[in-house]
Image (cartoon, rainbow, N blue to C red):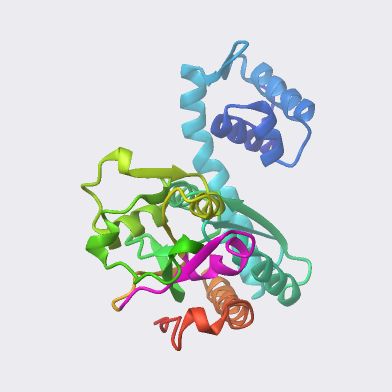
Amino acid sequence: MSNLTLKQLRYFEALAQHLHFGRAAAASAVTQPALSTQIKDLEQALGASLFERNARNLRLTGFGEEFAARVAPILRSVDELEDLARAAQNRLIGRLRIGIIPTIAPYLLPSIVAALSQHYPGLDLQVRETVTSKLLAELQGGRLDVAILALPIGEPALAEVALFGEEFLLVRPQADANKPVPAQDALREMKLLLLEEGHCFRDQALSFCDARALKPREMLDGSSLSTLVQMVGAGIGVTLIPLMAVPVETRSAAVSLARFEAPRPSRRVGMVWRRSNPLADQLVQVAELVRSATLTWFSQAVDASLAGPEPLYPSE
């Protein structure tokens, strides 16, 4: 058998993850023909098929599943060797793979990327936006270096650093602007618009409303906060959004905003990474830089009249 290459193994891992040549090629930053050629060469070198192909589906063969299980730790070890070399230089250079949840990315990502690019010239930032469960799986699998999401995670193998806290605001149609702010029990009786299953923000909103017993027909799901706010503007119901989303999502919607009475719903946002990551010391510095950039963004972007006197609670 000919020598296998790391490039082939990485392309195989991408295709095994996405099970779609186009998405795997995009994730690998190569053209689809280039990725297809490498997979074909890999299968020829192995003398066995890794994927079952038909007009609609792509799936791993039995051999492909076993091969994927062996490839993953090999690539993680290679990545750790690269991280070890970078850590020895006592400065962050090369690639940094950041994961971030969808209820944070559209609002804070530009300021985070700008701060990191300015502080670490030449840093190759690679950003992945997806829900918490996928970020944690990719982080623990070594496909991400760090993730920005809602805390706590409570995974012993992961280090957690709190960045900031923010409250949730009630979004109502403009016609309801002068109505009293509903209490938690009253909110349960309203038509509550929520993000679809898989988003941690959905779970946080349901927890505040204690709405676990709501019937499915009493809630409507959306794929993004933007969709939910526009649905409220159309008079379909009410929703909750995090403070950071206010400047972006409400500027073109016919909605009104209200703060809840204390104790207000809120979340703590933080950064997590594997404790075993050789870059752990550098990632602590990255977390401090991200905290500074986000708090500066909050002070400039969020209307103080909406945020109140203490919109952010301290990060321990």
Left or right: 178 with respect to 174? left
Q: Is residue 115 above or below residue 97?
A: below
Residue pictured at 57% horizontal, 27% vertical: 19
Q: Position of residue 259 (x, y in %)?
A: 40, 74
Q: Is residue 287 above or below residue 47?
A: below
* Image quadrant where one finds the C terminus: bottom left
Q: Position of residue 62 (x, y in %)?
A: 46, 18
Choose between 205 and 121: the one closer to the eye.
205
Q: Position of residue 81 (x, y in %)?
A: 59, 56
Whether residue 35 appears in this view of the structure is yes
Choose between 189 and 242: the one closer to the eye.
189
Query: Number of numbered discs present?
Result: 0
Choose between 107 and 12: the one closer to the eye.
107
Q: Is residue 251 magenta?
A: yes
Q: Is residue 101 above or below residue 311?
A: above
Q: Position of residue 84 (x, y in %)?
A: 59, 63
Q: Is residue 97 magenta?
A: no
Boundaries of the magenta span: 242-261
